[in-house]
């Protein structure tokens, strides 16, 4: 492995970790906002919990699964309650950008090692 590849590997790893942390925080903010402003939608989504945020009355395995399902759902389709909330729109936009960057970083990592 050349010095350039090592440097690229470190840069991609740092980007990967940073974006992962950022997206977890954005997602937790989005779920928290849904809980606070639109409880009916939160219940309909299965009472999802995030990595660092969960409702005081809910913290089960089912809530964790609901959180993962909700994350995949909002990446590809915007729920109605988000369209009515400017703060939620911002969180979702940031989450989607982070997911895109994370995917690009992961693909770059793959390419770095696939074509040696």
Image (cartoon, grey):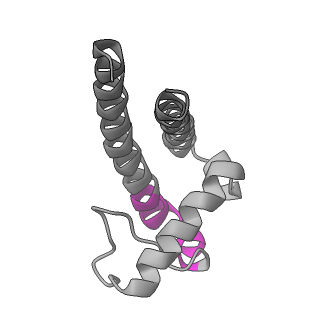
Establish if 57 lies above or below 95.
Answer: below
Which residue is nearer to you in this view: 74 or 41?
74
> In the displayed structure, does residue 51 sit left or right of residue 64?
left
Of the pair 80 and 66, the residue shown nearer to us: 66
Region in magenta: 31-43
- Give residue 113's position: percent from left, percent from top: 47, 33
Residue depicted at x 57% and y 35%: 100
Residue 83 spot, x, y in % from top left: 67, 47
Q: 22 and 101: which one is in front?
A: 101
Q: Taking 11 as reference, is 17 above or below it?
A: below
Residue 38 located within the stretch drawn in magenta: yes
Q: Position of residue 106 (x, y in %)?
A: 49, 38
Residue 35 horizontal side relative to residue 2, left or right: right
Q: Looking at the rendering, in which quadrant would you find the N terminus?
A: top left
Judge whether residue 9 is colored magenta. Answer: no
Q: Main secondary structure of the magenta part?
A: helix
The residue sitting at 61% across, 78% down in the picture is 44
Q: Position of residue 71 (x, y in %)?
A: 54, 59
Q: Taking 108 as reference, is 2 above or below it?
A: above
For the point 68% across and 57% down, which residue is it? Answer: 79
Query: How many labels sit on residues?
Result: 0
Q: Residue at x 33, y 63 (%)?
A: 51
Left or right? Give the position of 64 relative to 17: right
């Amino acid at each position: 492995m050349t010095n350039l590849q090592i440097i690229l590997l470190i840069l991609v790893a740092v980007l990967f970790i940073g974006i992962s942390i950022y997206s977890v925080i954005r997602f937790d903010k989005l779920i928290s906002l849904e809980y606070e402003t639109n409880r009916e939608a939160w219940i309909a989504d299965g009472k999802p919990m995030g990595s660092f945020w969960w409702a005081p009355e809910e913290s089960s395995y089912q809530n964790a699964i609901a959180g993962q399902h909700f994350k995949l759902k909002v990446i590809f389709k915007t729920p109605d309650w988000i369209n009515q909330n400017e703060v939620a729109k911002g969180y979702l936009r940031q989450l989607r950008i982070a997911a895109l960057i994370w995917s690009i970083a992961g693909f770059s990592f793959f390419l770095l090692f696939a074509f040696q």
